[in-house]
Structure formats: structure tokens, C-alpha cells
Image (spheres, rainbow, N blue to C red):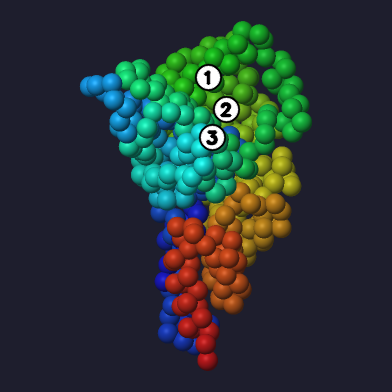
Amino acid sequence: MKVLAPGVRVQYLALAPTLGRRPGNAVISGGSTPSLRRSFKRATAVIFLSMLLAVPVPSHAQVTQTESISGLVYLDERPPGRLAPTIDLELRYANRPGEPMRTVVSGEGEYRFGGLWPGVYIITASAPGYRSVTVEIELARGSRPRRNTKLVLQSEAAPPGPRPGGIVSQNALQAPREARRRMEQAEKAFLDGQTDTAARLVAEALAAYPGYARALYLRGRVLERQGRPESAARSYEEAISRDPDLYLAYSAAAELYRVLADNGSLRRISELWKKAQPLESAPYYYSALARYESGEYRPALEDVTAAYNLPHSNLPHINLLMANCYLKLKNPRAAAERLLEFLATQPDDPLAEQARRTLSEIDRILSP
């Protein structure tokens, strides 16, 4: 029986030796797809919604229902993969009543709304663990240039700015004007998908101020987008060494180490993150993942329980990880309680059906 927990590779636990019944295997699987991208990614974790408006040119003056809106939805700069079913994409006519249109998002992040009249539309994109984002789009009749609309949606785990309350770090204050100007240009280029331009501008910012933590962090984002995760992680760590309060870099590094299955580095960065943000649930959760993967199930349970006792709405799979820990510790009753809470709070989660099957298997084993 399978339970998929975020970031956990396939493990098996035979319950029979403890329960005196036929073995029931609880499978904990996260595969290589980063299911935590839906939870919180980096502290700058974003949904990057790139909407391409394709407006056909009518062959006559009559208004026809042939307009369309299509584009991409990314979770934290990546295609959503297995998390695509968790993305809710709605289209409404502006200032008109009626039910919204919905469409599916592919694993590559592609979506399309077709058969639309010209007019003004509202698109809302949302996913568990992220703040929803809304954009207004006007579809005009006749020939119209194609254009890209790009939105950034921060994870609920991300702080609203560089520091709570808008405090700017000393590292940023020491940046010369030219470095700050280059960074503003680099960030805009990065959000516009101009990765090479962003890389050049970041390099220029670092040439003007080699210890610029903000630039080192963005360099990591660029390297990650270029498919160089090891180099990206090193850049994040350098940013942290320059500015230990740059919280965005901790979650970025932790997520990369999780994806790379580097549990030693994941545990180390999580411990540093705990010291920087002791009242945030995310560092305890990542620490629990690292300990679980290392076979340290009791410490993993302690860490995930600490995360549970803090605000954790950005961690929809926290009960699954707790259930997996309890199963490894041969406590199926406690595991069942966690699965029940997961199903009560996340009934439509893609992992809910597998959680129900595992819960049924636990009930069968525990029944007299």
C-alpha cells in the first residue's frame, strides 16, 4: 500500500512483526519529482505564470467566438510535473456574472482557454501553499500582436520582503549604486525570462560589489534555471555566508539539496536555517526529511512535530511525513491519526487516494 510523502524516496516497512498479521508494506515515495515545490520551495518560491495571448485574425468583420488564451504555469520556475493537478486555473468575464471556466494544466505547465469572445477576462491561478494571483486580460477583435504577460506568485512560506517590516540588511546598504542598478535590471530580466541577460547583469553587479548577497542569491537562481544545480547551491551558500539573514537563500539551498538527495548538506543547511528563523516551520520540515532519508526516524519525528506545532499552512503534506515516521517506528495507530487529519484537510490532494488505501490497510491489520 502506497503513501507518497514529499521528497522521500521509496522505502518499505513490514508491519507484520509487530502486529502479528500478514505484512502490509507502507510505501513512501516522492520519486525524483520535487513535490515540495507545491509547499514552499524557496523563500522566493514563485508560481511563474507566462500567458501567451494568441488572437487570430478574422477573415471578415463578423465577431466570432474564436479567440483564445494560452500559456504556461510554472511552480517555482519549473514545470509542475506531478503537481499539475493541484493547480487551479479559472477564467471569468470581467464584470459579468456566471460560473468561471476552468482548464487543466499539463505536466509541462501548458494550458489553454479556447472559444472565447473578444472582451476583458480575469484569470486567477492558485495552488495549495501559494498566494493566488489574478490578472486582467483584454482580447480584441482583429489583428493584434502576440504578447507575454508574466506574473510572480510568492509561496506562503516566503517572507513578504527582504526582511520583516522592510528592514534592509547591512550587506545591501553597503552595495554601491552601480551594483544596485545592475541588480534591479538583472531581476527584471530574470522575471522576463531573459536568463542570459540576467546572468550578464548579475556578473556586472558582483564585479562592482563581490560580496553582494542579493546578487549571489540571484546568480543561484540563474544557475538553477540553466540546469546547474550544484553550482546554484554553492552560490546560495555563499549568499548566506555574506548575509546570514537572507532567508530566501536558505530555502533555495535546502530545496536543491533535497532534489539532489544530498542529505548531509540538507541537514546542515536546515540547522543553520533553524538558527536564522527559529519560529518558521520550513527549516524543521526540511531537517525532518534529511533525517528520515538517513534512517533517523525518531529525530525525524521530533523535527516534523516541531514543524507541526508552528504555523504550517504552507506544508500540506506534513501529516504524511509524520505518518511515515510513525510507520517506521511501528506505531500504526498514530500513523492512522495523521492520515485521517491529512484526508480531512486535503481531501482533493493528488496523494489522497493513496493515503486512503494505506489507511484501509492499517485498519485491516489492526482489526481483531
Q: Position of residue 95 (x, y in %)?
A: 53, 34
Crowding around mark 3 (Cα neighbors within 10 Å: few <14, some 14 to 19, many 20+) is: few
Task: Give the crowd class for mark 1: few <14, some 14-19, many >=20 residues within 10 Å.
Answer: some
Q: Residue at x 39, y 23 (%)?
A: 140
Q: Earlier in the sequence, mark 2 or mark 1?
A: 1
Image quadrant holding the N terminus, namely bottom left
Camera-near label (3 vs 1) is 3
Between the C-alphas of marks 2 and 1, the distance is 15 Å
| Residue 214 as seen in the image, left or right of residue 188 | right
> Are dots 3 and 2 in contact, CB under 8 Å?
no
Q: Residue furthest left?
A: 59
| Residue 188 in sight in this render | yes
Circle nearer the N terminus (3, 1): 3
The residue carrying mark 2 is 217
Q: Is residue 230 visible?
A: no
Mark 3–mark 1 Cα distance, whole angstroms, equals 32 Å
Q: Residue at x 53, y 11 (%)?
A: 204
Residue 168's label in the rendered image is none
Which residue bears the numbered disc 1?
A: 188
Q: Secondary structure at mark 1?
A: helix
Residue 29 in the figure: left or right of residue 211 = left
Q: Position of residue 211 (x, y in %)?
A: 63, 19
Q: Nearer the viewer, residue 105 or 66?
A: 66
Residue bearing the label numbered 3: 95
Q: Is residue 193 left or right of residue 320?
A: left
